[in-house]
Amino acid sequence: MRHLMSPLDFSVEELDQLLDLAVDIENHPEKYAHACDGKKLATLFYEPSTRTRLSFEAAMINLGGSVLGFSSAASSSAAKGESVSDTIRMISCYADICAMRHHKEGAPMVASTVSSIPVINAGDGGHQHPTQTLTDLLTIRSLKGRLGNLTIGLCGDLKFGRTVHSLVKALARYEGVKFVFISPEELRIPSYIKEDVLEVNHLPYQEVERLEDVMGDLDILYMTRVQRERFFNEEDYIRLKDFYILDRKKMELAKDDMIVMHPLPRVNEISVEVDKDPRAAYFRQVQYGVYVRMALILTLLEVKVC
C-alpha cells in the first residue's frame, strides 16, 4: 500500500507514467468509466475547499466509484475532540482510499502511519499540496510540451503558498528550469526552499519585487493570492493583499506563448480582463486536475485498465 504526502514520493519516471495515464484518461474517458466500480473515496476536509474537494469527488465518480466524507472540521467528530489518527482508523472501515486536507502541517502524514487504506495529502497548512502540483505539471506539459528548459515566475504569497513550495520541489528535478520569485519582502520564498532545494542542486533563481521587470523573460507565470487565513493580523493582510494585480497592460509585456497559471481561488490578483487572453490557462488547469486525480486514484488503488 502506498500513500501520497509529497510530489517527491514519486520518482520522475513514475511522475511521467502518471501524467501519461492522465493524458490517456483525457483522450479516452469511456475506457475508465467503470474502473473503480464498487470503490469508495473518503474526502476528509478539515479546511474549506471548492476545487480540490470537488475535483477529487468528480474524479472518483468519473471512474465509477462513490464518495463519502465531510467538508469542514465543524461537521465532523473533530469538533468533539476526535484525533486525526482515530478518524482515519474509523474511515478505513468505510472507504478504500482517502483524501485529507488539514490546517496542521503533517496531519495527513500522521494519518498515513495508522491507516489501512491509501491516504492522499490534499493540503496541509502552508506546507505541501501535492495533487495541485500534479495538476500543475500536467498543465505545463500539456500546454508547453515539456517540463524542462523553462523559466517559471512565481508571484504573490511565496511564504505561505503550499502550492508554490510543492511545485518548486517537483520542477527542481527537471533540467534547464530557472525560477523567478516575485514577491514583497514579507512574503518571500522560505529560506529552506532556497537552501535545501535550489542551492544544494545548483539551480538558478532570482528574487525580484516588480512583476513588470521580468514579464518578458517568463515562459510561465504562476500567480497566487495573498492568503488571508495564513496571516496573524488583519493589518498585514490588508497592506499586502493588492500588492500584485495582473492586468492587460502587464500582459502586453509577456511573450506571445507565455501561459498564466493560478491554483485558485483568485481574489483580485488577476483582473477578469485577462480571462479572455488565450495565454490564460487557470480554468483549463482545473480540468487537468480532474484527469490527474483520476490517474492518481487508479495508481494508488493499483487498478489496471487495458
Image: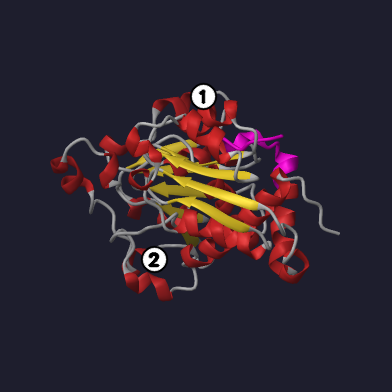
Check residue 8 for magenta coloring. yes
Q: Are marks 1 and 2 in contact (CB under 8 Å)?
A: no
Where 129 falls versus 284 (above or below)? above
Residue 202 picture location, percent across and down: 57, 28
Sort mark 2 into few (<14), some (14-19) or many (20+) by Cα contacts within 10 Å: some
- Asked which secondary structure carries label 1, the reply is helix
Residue 258: image location, x then y, percent: 51, 62
The quarter of the picture where residue 188 lies is: top left
Residue in the image at 62% along x and 34% along y: 8
SS at circle 2 = helix
Report if residue 159 is visible in the image: no
Specify few, some or many for label 1: CA neighbours under 10 Å numbering under 14, 14-19, or 20 or more: few
Give, as a three-letter code, the residue at label 2.
Met
Q: Quadrant of residue 230?
A: top left
Residue toward you, 207 or 24:
24
What is the span of residues highlighted in magenta in the rendered image?
1-15
Mark number, residue 251? 2
The residue wearing badge 1 is 196
